Amino acid sequence: MKYADKIELSNIQVYEVGDVQIENLVLKALAAGIKEIVVGPCALDLVEKMLKDHDNITINCAVSYPSGAYLLEQKIQEIQDLIDEQKRIDAFYVVMSEGQYLSGHVAEMKEELTEIVHASNNIPVKIVTEISVLDETQMEEVAEAIITAGAQGVVISADFKPYDIQEPSIEQVKKFVEIVGNRIDVIGAGNVTQKERFLDMLDAGVTRVNTTNGFEILKELN
């Protein structure tokens, strides 16, 4: 297994994300052979300027991050604006409105996911959720809605720092992976700062792992 292929390197989880941090993210990805990075919209111009065509790095752009507590119309407008501005975006990370769903608005949740994927204009979408606050029935409902909407993948935690939502346990990750099966990608996330948790996520069956410490984890593993 090539561990670098199992990482989506990100720094959107931390507050201080200026030019220096974005440059370091790209340079670390290039140095370690990591093929996926996750950034916010304001970083897109700098990232594109740094990358060459042969670098073969996928740029994931986070939308409505971290809470997802935006109107559906706002999320769609943000996606459409980014597309209209012809930014280089290879995939969207879009945070679902988890609070709305947990309040019982199931139909609205399904509509949101469907409309988000439709608005992306065939750019792949990875829906960000929080599996740690879902019971097994809710995991099944959310997973089916994401798959039915046509998303490419699901990210199991926004992992924002500091966050009062608990990190998903490895048991929860295993259960969610089991529910999803091989139908779409499952991106592990949630305090993946050490190689042990990274390996535990992979053992749980996730497709890749979102982490701010991918470069450091790879140094330990190599």
Image (cartoon, helix red, strand yellow):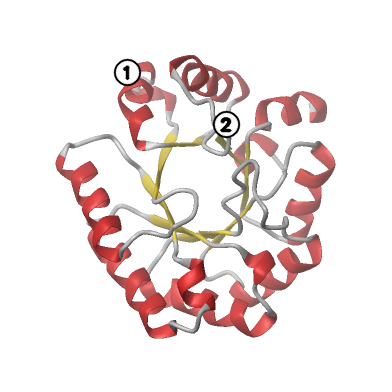
Q: Quadrant of the N terminus?
A: top right
Q: Quadrant of the C terminus?
A: top right
Relative to 28, say whether 6 is above or below. Answer: below
Relative to 7, say whether 177 is above or below. Answer: below
Q: Residue at x 72, y 55 (%)?
A: 167
Q: Position of residue 109 (x, y in %)?
A: 41, 76
Question: What residue does disc 1 label?
Answer: 49
Q: Which residue is at the front of the view, 65 or 116?
A: 65
Relative to 44, say whether 130 is above or below. Answer: below
Name the side, left or right, on which 72 lies relative to 201: left
Name the side, left or right, on which 79 lies relative to 202: left
Question: What residue does disc 2 label?
Answer: 34
Query: Of discs 1 and 2, which sits in the foreground?
Result: 1
Query: What amino acid type should be assigned to the residue bearing mark 2?
Result: Ile
Relative to 220, say whether 107 is above or below. Answer: below
Query: In this view, which residue lies farthest toward the right?
Result: 196
Label 2: which secondary element: loop
Q: Position of residue 70 (x, y in %)?
A: 36, 59
Q: Which residue is at the front of the view, 64 or 34?
A: 64
Q: CA distance from mark 1 to mark 2?
A: 18 Å
Name the side, left or right, on which 123 lies relative to 167: left
Query: What amino acid type should be assigned to the residue bearing mark 1?
Result: Lys
Query: In this view, which residue lies farthest toward the top?
Result: 20
Check disc 1: other Cα within 10 Å, few if <14, some if 14-19, many if 20+.
Answer: few
Write down the quadrant of residue 61 in the picture: top left
Q: Position of residue 125 (x, y in %)?
A: 39, 56
Q: Residue at x 60, y 55 (%)?
A: 157
